[in-house]
Amino acid sequence: MGQNEAGKSNLFEALYTLNPIIAGAEYSLDEDWPVDRWEGRKTATGKLVCKAQFVLSTEEIEDLAEVALVTPVVEEGKDALPAPPLPEAVRIVLWRGYGAQARFKVHDFAEGTLDEDKAVAWAKAKVPKFVYIHDYKMSGAQMELDGSVRAGGGNSDLRWCDGGGHRIGRLRWSCETST
C-alpha cells in the first residue's frame, strides 16, 4: 500500500511482464519508457527493465538436483565418485528487457554439476507466474483488506503461483530504470 502516484502499479506491471501468467505480455517502449529519459529510447531495445531473484527451499533444491544434476561418466572397471553435496542455498534469477524474452539462471550449484538446459527448463516450469489485476470492476474506490483475507481462507500473505499453486521460497526483486 502506498500513496497515489508512488509507482505501485508500475512496479506490479513490471513484475507481471517479467513472467506473466498469460503469455504475450511485453514491455512497451511507447508506454513503459520513462518520460523524463526520452532521449535514450532509441537505443533501449534489450535494456534491463526488471529482475527478480527466488531463493529455493531445501525440497526445491533436491527436486532441481534430481532433474538436472549431471551424472559423471564412469570408466569401465572404476568406481563412481560420490555425488557432490547439494548447496544449502540456491537462487534462481530471472530478468527481462525491452523487446526481449525473460532469461533464467540457476546459481549456487558447483560449476559443471548441473545440466544448464535442464536447470533452466525446471526453473521456467517452477518459478511462479505473476498476475496483474489492474481493472477491479468494483463499485467504490477501495478494497477492504480484511475481506480479501477472508476470501483467501484466513491467510494474510500475498503469494504468486504457477497455476498449480506451487510456491517458491522468498522473492527479492528490483526494477531498474534504464539510462
Image (cartoon, rainbow, N blue to C red):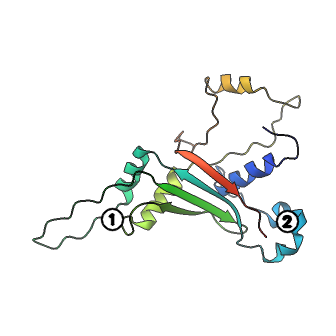
Which label was assigned to residue 70? 1
Which label was assigned to residue 143? none
Q: Residue furthest front?
A: 88
| Residue that carries the numbered disc 2 in the rendered image | 30
Using the image, determine if residue 50 lies above or below residue 16: below
Proximity of marks 1 and 2: CB atoms separated by less than 8 Å: no
Q: Position of residue 135 (x, y in %)?
A: 81, 41
Which of the 4 image quarters holds residue 51? bottom right
- The type of residue carrying mark 1 is Val
Residue at 58%, 42% (x, y): give it: 161
Say which of 17 and 37 sits in front. 37
Which of the 4 image quarters holds residue 158? top right
Q: Is residue 104 left or right of residue 67?
A: right
Q: Position of residue 89 (x, y in %)?
A: 44, 52
- The type of residue carrying mark 2 is Asp
Q: Position of residue 90 (x, y in %)?
A: 46, 54
Residue at 43%, 62% (x, y): give it: 118
* Viewer-nearest of discs 1 and 2: 1
Say which of 162 and 155 sits in front. 155
Give the secondary structure at mark 2: helix
Give the secondary structure at mark 1: loop
Circle nearer the N terminus (1, 2): 2
Where is the C terminus found, in terms of image quarters?
bottom right
Q: Is residue 44 left or right of residue 50?
A: right
Q: How many marks?
A: 2
Q: Residue furthest left?
A: 77
Q: Dot 2, crowdedness within 10 Å: few (<14), some or many (≥20)? A: few
Q: Position of residue 164 (x, y in %)?
A: 53, 41
Where is the N terminus found, in terms of image quarters?
top right
